[in-house]
Amino acid sequence: MPARMMAWLRRFLALATAVAWAAIATAAFAHTSNGGPLTGTWSGYIAGNGVKRQHIVVVVNARQSGGTWRLSATCHGPLTLDSISSGYHHYLRRRGQGVTCATGDIDCLKRVGPNVFDAVTSHRGGEYDVSGTLRRVSS
């Protein structure tokens, strides 16, 4: 291989390595400073067989250990991380102040591209499981 081509190849590999390390460092910094992939405010609709479509807003804190959920002015409360499995974070819905709806459902959240998939497991043992795709709310 000619000397010029070898020099060009060495420069290219050095540049590619530098770019790769910069991407890794940026991703690591973004993860630690802005929270995990579920961190933020998400909004969308959840529905299931025989269940009326409901608008939901979910806010996940930076540590992804909890947050809040809201279906309406009288149906909302805190979320508490229960477990993580198969790529899903399972959050238990707790009762908020002045809530008139039943609580105890589990919101199973998983990042899918730019969105979050929310599979809700009913506190009634699967009597009315619902799901839907939530989109990030711009701040």
Image (tube, helix red, strand yellow):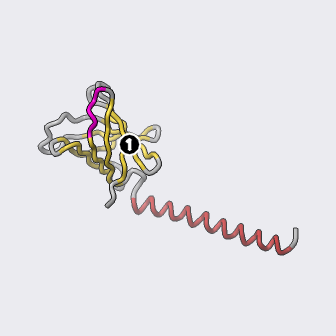
Tell me where residue 54 appears, x and y as whole percent: 26, 38
The residue wearing badge 1 is 133
Nearer to me, 81 or 88: 88
Q: Residue furthest right?
A: 1
Residue 138 is inside the magenta segment: no
Quadrant position of the N terminus in the picture: bottom right
Q: Which region of the structure is painted magenta?
A: 50-54
Nearer to me, 64 or 109: 109
Tell me where residue 86 appears, x and y as whole percent: 47, 38
- Residue at 75% x, 70% y: name it: 10
In the image, 8: left or right of 66?
right
Residue 51 is inside the magenta segment: yes
Element under disc 1: strand
- Residue at 35% x, 36% y: name it: 131
- Residue at 66% x, 66% y: name it: 16
Dominant secondary structure (helix, strand or loop) of the stretch shown in magenta:
strand
